[in-house]
């Protein structure tokens, strides 16, 4: 800090001397002009030395880990320290990441802030397609007509038979549906009115070896909730992650508020954090929202290193948080979980059973009553939509997830394994003559040709129309404006399309998953399916080992 203050004083002093020299010049003769030029050269040389030294100091601080608490180890002040965002009073003065890139999609149809505990789903499904890398036809452990308890295994991946995929509810297996090439698409359970649970027993974490803990979690059905990066797979039970990351907020459009989700489950969340600390030799990082005050359990959680994020979407994405907290090297493996997955993990140790309860948001402008619903993982959305659709809505699209990354399902489809949101959109099956030239209807866009940037709080009634077809993949610079990561996504996408593995890896492929570049896909002028391209690249790299 002393060095930084000294450098600032030197620059200010030289600047004043230079201005005084200019002001005192009576005429621009050759002597005065030479003197002024010497001052300019001297100041430029000094600035160059300071910037080079500043960069080297930052690099060394990162190499030795001295900057892990968010300290600015540099000669010059950070730009954020001069013109930084004014943060709310609940945000501390350390570990704060103010992101300047991103874009918030402000849509109609936010879920009303209350939880409907009376609306029930009759059937629940576990879909193998929700898990990247799983065999298309996993090994089934049940048949149609079998009775299961919550926590009883339904199937397992033939490559990792130790990890069981368990029923979220008790009831009867009424269908094992298949898709193309007889791949299993979903296992459906008709839920009992009164739930029964498979008892796993409770244990003292401090008395368990890590191998015993991993085996216990893999058998109980909780393990598939832990995702591994790179590749966004179910975590490998034979790997010890460098670190584990949990984001406590979701900045995606119409996403549920985690403060609603955590209410009444604080003890389970803290227990889940305790379990995670036994699974890594590194650190459990907690990403918190610096724009809206988090619940007290998030702010006071023990056994974590907290980092605060202020910015637009995708500030809530755990991938963005990893990038700014402790970026991944090519050989690193980290694990990630969501808030409700941590709660389920903690409930297993607090009560010895697989409690797959979920608080989900059903949202969208086409709904009469968008709200939160208490249900279980894999719930059928049919009862949630019944008598809740606007009669004039017309043809609709139902998504499990948000509008940027959600998967399309039928009106009687099922909640995704990792999802806590159902979104309803109107199908945009219409053509707009010169719609790009004459924006007659308001629509969400980052382009300043649309007047929406003048009304940041305006809520848009979005539909599925893409306002154009796939075009030539041209360089626009749009992706870099909305992705707050030191990655060049357009160059990366093109390297994937030509199958250049070395360039893909060098451009940061292993740091990304689909949700991280979903906003890039939204703003893409070329209408490229970037999420699918990225998944193709990840699968290609995974196949090469």
Image (cartoon, helix red, strand yellow):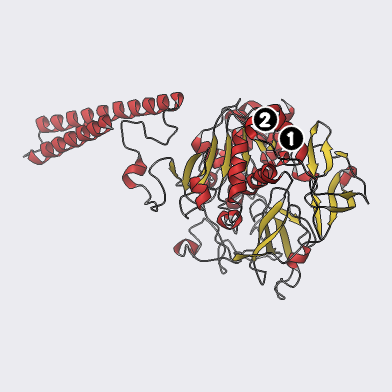
Q: Is residue 355 left or right of residue 455?
A: right
Q: Which mark is residue 60?
A: none
The residue labelled by disc 1 is: 216
Q: In this view, does 446 lie to the left or right of 128?
A: left
- Would residue 490 be visible to someone looking at this image? no
- Per the image, label 1 sits on a secondary structure element best described as helix
Q: Distance between the residues labelled 1 and 2?
A: 10 Å
The residue labelled by disc 2 is: 208
Q: Which class describes the residues within 10 Å of circle 2: few (<14), some (14-19), or many (20+)?
A: few
**Image spot of residue 288 (x, y percent):** 50, 47
**Image spot of residue 534 (x, y percent):** 66, 39
Q: In this view, does 99 lie to the left or right of 364?
A: left
- Per the image, label 2 sits on a secondary structure element best described as loop
Q: Residue at x 59, y 34 (%)?
A: 277
Image height of 323 relative to 84, above or below: above
Mark 1 touches mark 2? (CB < 8 Å): yes
Picture quarter containing residue 138? top right
**Image spot of residue 239 (x, y percent):** 67, 27
Image height of 302 relative to 450, above or below: above
Q: Which residue is drawn at 39% across and 51% down?
A: 87
| Of 274 and 87, the residue lying toward us | 274
């Amino acid at each position: 800090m002393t060095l930084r203050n000294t450098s600032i004083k030197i620059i200010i002093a030289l600047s004043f001397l230079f201005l005084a020299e200019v002001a005192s010049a009576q005429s621009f003769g050759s002597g005065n002009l030479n003197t002024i030029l010497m001052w300019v050269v001297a100041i430029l040389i000094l600035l160059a030395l300071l910037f080079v030294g500043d960069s080297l100091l930052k690099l060394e601080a990162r190499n030795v880990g001295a900057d892990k608490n968010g300290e600015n180890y540099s000669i010059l002040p950070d730009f954020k320290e001069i013109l930084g965002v004014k943060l709310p009073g609940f945000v501390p003065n350390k570990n704060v990441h103010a992101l300047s890139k991103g874009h918030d999609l402000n849509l109609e149809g936010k879920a009303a802030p209350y939880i409907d505990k009376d609306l029930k789903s009759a059937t629940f499904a576990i879909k193998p397609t929700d898990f990247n890398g799983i065999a298309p036809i996993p090994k089934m452990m049940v048949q149609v007509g079998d009775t299961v308890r919550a926590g009883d295994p339904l199937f397992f991946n033939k490559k990792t038979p130790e990890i069981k995929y368990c029923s979220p509810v008790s009831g009867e297996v009424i269908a094992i549906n298949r898709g193309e090439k007889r791949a299993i698409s979903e296992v459906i359970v008709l839920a009992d009115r009164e739930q029964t649970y498979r008892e796993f027993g409770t244990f003292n974490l401090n008395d368990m070896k890590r191998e015993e803990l991993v085996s216990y979690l893999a058998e109980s059905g909780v393990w598939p909730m832990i995702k591994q990066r790179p590749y966004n797979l179910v975590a490998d039970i034979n790997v010890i992650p460098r670190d584990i990351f949990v984001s406590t907020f979701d900045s995606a459009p119409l996403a549920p508020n985690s403060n609603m989700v955590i209410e009444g489950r604080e003890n389970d969340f803290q227990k889940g954090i305790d379990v995670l600390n036994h699974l890594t030799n590194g650190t459990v990082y907690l990403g918190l929202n610096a724009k809206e005050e988090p619940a007290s359990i998030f702010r006071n959680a023990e056994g974590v290193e907290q980092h605060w994020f202020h910015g637009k979407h995708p500030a809530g994405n755990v991938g963005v948080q990893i990038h700014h907290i402790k970026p991944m090297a090519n050989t690193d493996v980290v694990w990630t979980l969501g808030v409700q997955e941590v709660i389920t993990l903690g409930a297993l140790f607090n009560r010895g059973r697989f409690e797959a309860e979920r608080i989900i948001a059903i949202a969208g402008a086409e709904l009469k009553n968008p709200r939160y619903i208490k249900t279980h993982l894999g719930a059928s959305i049919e009862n949630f939509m019944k008598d809740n659709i606007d009669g004039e809505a017309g043809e609709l699209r139902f998504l499990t997830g948000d509008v940027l990354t959600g998967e399309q399902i039928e009106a009687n489809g099922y909640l995704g394994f990792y999802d806590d949101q159902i979104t309803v959109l109107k199908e945009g099956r219409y053509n707009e003559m010169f719609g790009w030239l004459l924006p007659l209807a308001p629509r969400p866009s980052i382009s300043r040709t649309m007047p929406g940037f003048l009304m940041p709080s305006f809520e848009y009634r979005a539909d599925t129309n893409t306002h154009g077809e796939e075009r030539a993949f041209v360089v626009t610079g749009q992706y870099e404006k909305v992705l707050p990561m030191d990655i060049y996504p357009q160059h990366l996408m093109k390297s994937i399309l030509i199958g250049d593995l070395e360039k893909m890896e060098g451009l940061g492929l292993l740091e990304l998953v689909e949700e991280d570049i979903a906003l890039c896909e939204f703003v893409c002028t070329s209408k490229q399916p970037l999420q699918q391209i990225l998944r193709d690249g990840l699968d290609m790299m995974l196949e090469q080992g």
